[in-house]
């Protein structure tokens, strides 16, 4: 195979947020393919993967949806452990759900530090009329915690693709940083799997 | 399926498009067209033209419905294939994977990597090959073939086997190592195995081709290696995680009755869940972590099978995380896999290849872990309760008035709202005991009594304590299920049926045991709940609490067993499992210890021919059984001839021959009996106790007082002293209700200095020791200091037993004076009287009889004191016993009468004269009623006789009879049959019976209730109705009905099988508690009319037995 200097990334991205904000809807919309409807043969939508190719960098994105019901809240850490990215979803018509996002951010930063890329999604923008979370507040908050903010609608398929692309780029960047750092202090971060296609290729190039 | 993968940027087809036709490429991508790229191996072999490229760019028609190629050909996408028309024939070209690419505006377009060209027909052979290539081995054999099916493969296998062989020798100590060590040992082994495999040149060549081949190889090596070493390895993992698993099992089993809707799972998934459960239950069959992960994957694919009869497009039926997590919780609980933690860690840490489907497997494992965590957290139990109330609320919105109040009632019970429950039940509809006592006679209808009764009117509401919900639960079930201890008493006061069973045969006791509410268990036992009743699959309450790991409840049941032999340690359920099997399977070590200490048998086999040891999951538990097994004689089941051995254990100076058995077979290792088994108390305390007991043995009173930190010999005073906390103040000695626990805490805190009731590991107490040392002064001292007189050791030995066997009449007398229960049995069913007879100690026998020792009581092998006295040939004792009404023809379990045990003519004469005397008087009621009925199941005539004699009595006689019945201490005078039948079959009768309670028509309360045995106090109520109505006709009618049934009983007794009878005798106990046989007083001659309802005849059956029983007692007392 030819040497392209291409790299394969494998990322885990978890969706968190209160119940009914639209996490499941967002993921389904994102992986849905209107031409190639796989869901006819399988009903499984709990573990979803998507392959991205961002300028030759290949990303294998595993998207982990979580159950947002309050009763399962305590299980969060089990799911977000080892994640490279998290999408924190709130419903723009529900002030409380935005508060929940803030709690999640705090928890994630505490548990995973800056190792994780964060994205905040204000979902259901098709219901702009009933908005209860101000755009300015939400964006200001996101900026303050180093997260990107996206306005999405699972119903209208708005902002979703952009959000995942941006998050992936963020994760690639972070992986690159880590990789550089790792080369210095030689500690390998488990959660980012950087796989070179061909061991021989690596030898030839030496670095990317 | 291992998915095909390649980097499209390296594909010649793609690079041609991107580089050589960049204009076309830019145009197509900015329009977000979909690119189809033939896979590398195909593209490589062909020259790529512009037409080829244009045939592989798909564009959307304006409205987005149809697809066309750039060159204008129509295309469809179906079943993960691109469908084109080639040579007028539809051709399917499979999409290997799809990837989202981004154009210069960061807009995405799809790239399909396809199997072949869209515009060139694929060679037939090629097609087939590709399809098979993508599946991974399905069975272990296929994996092996993959590794070794090449030239030199055999040698490779041999090398690998040689390498793996020593591992199994190493693992023996592995279980004791830290978990991380086990992982590292195995991981090293995996690396070694990989090295050896890769030394093989043909394997190396194969792997060199692609990363995918390498992944498959790794998986194969893992599979092969783990399958061959997993036995020891997994065992070590299990042993390492035994404690965690036991904890998880406890939570899991407590929830074992959970329903789909309680977890919010939609019923539509039911079918899939069933299939998935079957698959999941095979988990432990797979040796390697990969095998188990593949099993999990199959479970998930079962779950995600499209559901029939529903719209496929309906996305709401997709298996999303919202469904998946609860379903996994459900499956884990229902799968009955006893080693989840071990499995979880095994799949996680020992899955070394980490290649095939790794992300997906991690997701499944995470879900399993989350599910287990959720089960463990205990929040499910709260949830279940919430959902129940929610359901009730919803129901109450829709339904009519009657059900509404029922639902409300149930949710009050559930929530423990005592005031509301009380209000809804109204006043107890049976008269208070106190009122009865004020009456001339329970049936009296004189004006004074009537006014008494009128002050306590019977009120009826829409609900009663019998009302049932859709599970067949009564309010008492609900209270037990939700731990509402304070309602138990209230409900029972209102006539709730203690032994009512639901659709599945669960009694409230079952539920309390399952949920682990010790206080309720104790309360129910206090109210004479049947501890042996099996549910529909044969589980007794003991099974239930062992199954869900509630040690405190197990202890409560065992405690009850000490008070009145009532549980069967070795009962088998429908699977043939004894409680010990269950404890072993789920890994509850301390429960196993408790059961073993209580003589649970370790040799019983279940249906799968497994002993408790066979079902053990880890080495800890197997060791427990092995230790126990190797212990000489100690507790390896209770052998008949051992009955007196326990007294030897406590070192009676004079050894005695075991002469209780007609067939002498006395094993000869009594001294070894005292192998210390438990050392549960902490050492310091233990040491103190040892010192104290030594002092007692030596009779050194000052030293005893020193150890006890007593300054004088007077009674202890002050409310803080534990001795002052009598049994009366506690609801129950083991009760844990807030009131009692504070009292008990008081006594625990002052236990720093030794308490007069302190017990050693065999539950011997100072008083036992004093009796054993035959030191009257010490006995007096201890009693003075508040020692409990009726304490028993693990073997059920009370101080009185010890005094009796030591022939110390003074101590016997002293103990009796201080309230020692005279008819108490040890674990072999012997009462002190048995022991005194055994020793031939006439004085003690006199004393015991003076204190109403029952003369015809039989021990667990059926011997009465007379049997024993005859065997020891102690004439004075025999004379005395006979004079007290001992029955010379009582049969023991082997069918021997005392008569059979002697050849001494004088004694035979003595017995003979008595036999004839008895027969002349033509009554034989002074026998242990239930015993006797058992002994002669084919002679209903004898029961008839009892009745005949009964009816012949005058009214006065019967009045004394009733009043004496009132004073009868039920526990003393009634005994449970010690032998227990095989309970593995559900007793349909009892279930039917409780169901009949459910159909109980309240409007017919007056009449039907009289005969419904489900209400323990019904006889009282009958009496009350009589009295208040003052209607002779009603009374006569009611009695006539009763008498009818009585007649029926005789036929019944003949036909009822043995176990049913057992059931009856249990029921009988329950009924006597209401002290109610007075109804018989006026009973007329049986009429001949048939009894329509089984129910009725049953209830009367009970009355009959009851009479027999009481009758027996009274004769003993009055003669
Ligand atoms: N109008 C509108 N409704 C949406 C949108 N996204 C989701 N919903 C609706 O919101 C509801 C909840 O969506 P889910 O995707 O199940 O929400 P979730 O976050 O997965 O909820 P949990 O799984 O309970 O945590 C559904 O009825 C969706 O149809 C949106 O963008 N616009
Ligand atoms: Mg969801």
Image: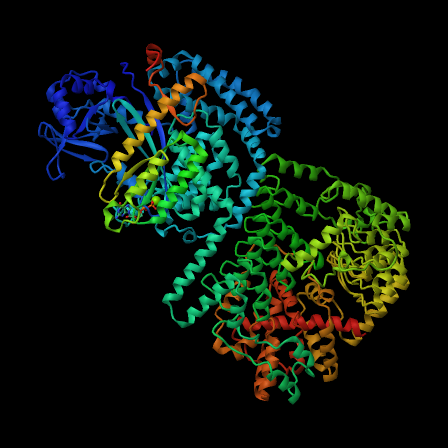
Q: Is residue A177 left or right of residue B762?
A: left
Q: Is residue B884 left or right of residue B966?
A: right
User: Residue B379 in the image: x percent, y percent?
Assistant: 49, 49
Q: Residue furthest left?
A: B72
Depth check: B1078 or B755 in front?
A: B755
Number of numbered markers: 0
Depth check: B793 or A145 in front?
A: A145
User: Residue B833 in the image: x percent, y percent?
Assistant: 82, 61
Q: Is residue B520 left or right of residue A13?
A: right
Image quadrant in which the C terminus of chain B is located: bottom right
With respect to residue B865, does B327 lie above or below?
Answer: above
Would residue B460 be visible to someone looking at this image? yes
User: Residue B350 in the image: x percent, y percent?
Assistant: 49, 28
Q: Residue furthest top?
A: A204
User: Residue B855 in the image: x percent, y percent?
Assistant: 80, 65
The image quarter in which residue B912 lies: bottom right
Say how the picture is coloured. rainbow
The image quarter in which residue B832 lies: bottom right
- Ligand 2 visible in quadrant: top left
Image quadrant in which the N terminus of chain B is located: top left
Q: Residue at x 50, y 62 (%)?
A: B473
With respect to residue B716, does B339 lie above or below?
Answer: above
Depth check: B1 or B364 in front?
A: B364
Q: Residue at x 57, y 64 (%)?
A: B487
With respect to residue A6, does B627 lie above or below?
Answer: below
Would residue B4 be visible to someone looking at this image? no
């Amino acid at each position: 195979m030819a040497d392209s200097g291409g790299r394969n990334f494998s990322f885990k991205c978890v969706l968190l947020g209160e119940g009914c904000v639209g996490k499941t809807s967002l993921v389904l919309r994102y992986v849905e393919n209107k031409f190639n409807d796989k869901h006819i043969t399988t009903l499984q939508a709990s573990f979803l993967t998507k392959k991205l190719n961002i300028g030759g960098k290949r990303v294998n994105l595993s998207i982990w949806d979580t159950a947002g019901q309050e009763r399962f809240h305590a299980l969060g850490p089990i799911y977000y452990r080892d994640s490279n990215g998290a999408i924190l979803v709130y419903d723009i018509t529900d002030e409380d759900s935005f508060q929940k996002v803030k709690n999640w951010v705090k928890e994630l930063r505490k548990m995973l530090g800056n190792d994780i890329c964060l994205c905040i999604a204000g979902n259901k923008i098709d219901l702009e009329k009933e908005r209860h979370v101000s755009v300015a507040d939400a964006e200001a908050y996101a900026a303050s915690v180093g997260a990107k903010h996206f306005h999405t609608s699972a119903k209208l398929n708005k902002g979703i693709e952009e959000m995942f692309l941006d998050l992936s780029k963020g994760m690639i960047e972070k992986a690159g940083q880590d990789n550089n750092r790792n080369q210095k202090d030689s500690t390998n971060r488990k959660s980012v799997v950087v796989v070179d296609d061909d061991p021989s290729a690596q030898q030839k190039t030496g670095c990317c | 399926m291992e998915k095909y993968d390649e980097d499209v940027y390296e594909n010649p087809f793609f690079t041609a498009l991107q580089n050589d036709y960049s204009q076309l490429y830019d145009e197509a991508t900015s329009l977000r067209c979909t690119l189809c790229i033939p896979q590398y191996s195909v593209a490589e072999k062909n020259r790529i033209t512009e037409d080829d490229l244009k045939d592989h760019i798909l564009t959307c028609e304006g409205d987005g419905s149809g697809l066309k190629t750039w060159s204008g050909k129509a295309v469809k996408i179906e079943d993960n294939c691109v469908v084109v028309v080639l040579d007028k024939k539809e051709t399917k070209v499979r999409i290997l994977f799809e990837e989202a690419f981004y154009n210069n505006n960061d807009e995405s377009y799809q790239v399909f990597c396809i199997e072949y060209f869209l515009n060139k027909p694929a060679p037939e052979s090629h097609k087939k090959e590709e399809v098979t290539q993508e599946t991974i081995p399905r069975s272990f054999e296929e994996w092996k073939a993959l590794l070794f099916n090449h030239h030199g493969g055999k040698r490779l296998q041999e090398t690998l086997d040689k390498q793996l062989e020593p591992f199994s020798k190493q693992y023996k100590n592995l279980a004791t190592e830290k978990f991380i060590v086990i992982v590292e040992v195995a991981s090293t082994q995996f690396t070694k195995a990989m090295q050896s495999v890769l030394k093989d040149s043909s394997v190396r060549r194969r792997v060199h081709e692609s990363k995918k081949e390498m992944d498959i190889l790794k998986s194969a090596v893992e599979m092969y290696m783990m399958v061959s070493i997993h036995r020891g390895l997994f065992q070590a993992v299990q042993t390492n995680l035994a404690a965690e698993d036991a904890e998880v099992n406890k939570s899991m089993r407590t929830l074992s009755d959970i329903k789909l809707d309680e977890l919010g799972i939609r019923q539509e998934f039911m079918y899939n869940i069933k299939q998935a459960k079957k698959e999941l239950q095979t988990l432990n069959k797979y040796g390697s972590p990969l095998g188990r992960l593949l099993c999990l994957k199959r479970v998930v694919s079962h779950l995600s099978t499209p559901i029939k009869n529903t719209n496929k497009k309906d996305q709401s039926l997709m298996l999303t995380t919202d469904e998946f997590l609860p379903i996994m919780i459900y499956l884990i609980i229902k799968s009955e896999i006893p080693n989840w933690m071990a499995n979880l860690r095994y799949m996680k840490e020992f899955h070394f290849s980490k290649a095939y489907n790794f992300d997906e497997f991690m997701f499944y494992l995470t879900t399993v872990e989350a599910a287990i965590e959720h089960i463990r957290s205990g929040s499910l139990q709260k949830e279940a309760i919430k959902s129940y109330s929610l359901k009730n609320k919803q129901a109450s919105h829709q339904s009519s008035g009657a059900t509404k109040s029922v639902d409300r009632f149930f949710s009050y019970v559930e929530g423990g709202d005592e005031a509301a429950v009380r209000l809804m039940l109204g006043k107890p509809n049976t008269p208070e005991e106190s009122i009865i006592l004020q009456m001339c006679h329970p049936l009296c209808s004189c004006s004074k009594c009537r006014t008494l009764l009128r002050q306590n009117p019977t009120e009826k509401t829409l609900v009663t304590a019998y009302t049932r919900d859709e599970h067949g639960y009564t309010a008492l079930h609900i209270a037990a299920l939700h731990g509402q201890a304070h309602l138990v008493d209230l409900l029972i006061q209102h006539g709730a049926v203690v032994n009512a069973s639901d659709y599945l045969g669960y009694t409230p006791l079952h539920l309390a045991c399952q949920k682990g509410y010790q206080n309720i268990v104790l309360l129910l036992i206090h109210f004479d709940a049947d501890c042996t009743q099996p549910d529909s699959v044969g589980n007794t309450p003991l099974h239930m609490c062992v199954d869900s790991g509630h040690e405190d409840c197990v202890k409560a049941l065992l405690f009850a067993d000490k008070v009145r032999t009532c549980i069967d340690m070795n009962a088998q359920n429908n699977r043939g499992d004894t409680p010990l099997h269950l404890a072993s399977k789920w890994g509850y070590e301390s429960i196993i210890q408790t059961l073993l200490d209580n003589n649970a048998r370790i040799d019983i086999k279940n249906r799968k021919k497994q002993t408790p040891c066979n079902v053990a999951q880890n080495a800890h538990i197997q060791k427990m059984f092995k230790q126990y097994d190797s212990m000489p004689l100690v507790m390896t089941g209770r052998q008949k001839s051992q009955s007196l051995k326990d007294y030897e254990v406590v070192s009676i100076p004079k050894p005695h021959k075991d002469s209780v058995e007609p067939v002498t077979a006395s094993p000869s290792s009594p001294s070894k009996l005292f192998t210390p088994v438990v050392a549960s108390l902490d050492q310091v305390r233990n040491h103190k106790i040892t010192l104290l007991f030594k002092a007692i043995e030596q009779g050194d009173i000052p030293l005893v007082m020193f150890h006890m930190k007593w300054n004088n010999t007077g009674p202890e005073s002050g409310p803080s002293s534990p001795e002052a906390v009598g049994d009366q103040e506690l609801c129950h000695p083991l009760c844990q209700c807030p009131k009692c626990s504070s009292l008990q805490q008081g006594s625990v805190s002052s236990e720093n200095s030794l308490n007069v009731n302190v017990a050693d590991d065999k539950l011997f107490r100072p008083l036992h020791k004093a009796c054993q040392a035959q030191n009257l002064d010490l006995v007096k001292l201890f009693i003075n200091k508040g020692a409990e007189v009726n304490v028993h050791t693990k073997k059920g030995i009370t101080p009185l037993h010890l005094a009796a066997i030591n022939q110390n009449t003074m101590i016997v007398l002293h103990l009796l004076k201080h309230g020692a229960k005279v008819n108490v049995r040890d674990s072999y069913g012997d009462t002190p009287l048995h022991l005194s007879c055994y020793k031939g100690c006439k004085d003690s026998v006199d004393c015991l009889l003076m204190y109403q020792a029952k003369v015809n009581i039989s021990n667990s092998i059926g011997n009465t004191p007379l049997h024993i006295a005859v065997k020891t040939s102690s004439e004075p004792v025999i004379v005395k016993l006979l004079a007290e009404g001992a029955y010379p023809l009582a049969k023991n379990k082997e069918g021997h009468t005392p008569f059979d045990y002697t050849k001494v003519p004088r004694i035979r004469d003595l017995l003979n004269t008595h036999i004839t005397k008895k027969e002349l008087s033509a009554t034989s009621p002074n026998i242990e009623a239930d015993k006797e009925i058992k002994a002669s199941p084919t002679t209903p005539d004898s029961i008839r006789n009892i009745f005949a004699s009964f009816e012949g009595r005058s009214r006065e006689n019967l009045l004394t009879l009733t009043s004496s019945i009132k004073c009868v201490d039920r526990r003393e005078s009634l005994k449970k049959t010690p032998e227990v039948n095989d309970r593995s079959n559900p007793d349909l009768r009892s279930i039917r019976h409780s169901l009949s309670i459910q159909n109980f028509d309240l409007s017919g309360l007056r009449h039907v209730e009289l005969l419904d045995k489900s209400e323990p106090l019904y006889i009282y109520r009958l009496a009350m109705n009589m009295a208040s109505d003052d209607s002779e006709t009603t009374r006569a009618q009611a009695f006539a009905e009763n008498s009818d049934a009585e007649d029926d009983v005789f036929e019944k007794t003949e036909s009822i099988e043995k176990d049913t009878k057992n059931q009856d005798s249990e029921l009988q106990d329950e009924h006597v508690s209401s002290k109610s046989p007075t109804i018989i007083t006026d009973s007329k001659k049986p009429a001949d009319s048939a009894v329509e309802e089984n129910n009725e005849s049953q209830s009367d059956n009970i009355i009959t037995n009851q009479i027999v029983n009481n009758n027996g007692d009274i004769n003993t007392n009055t003669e």
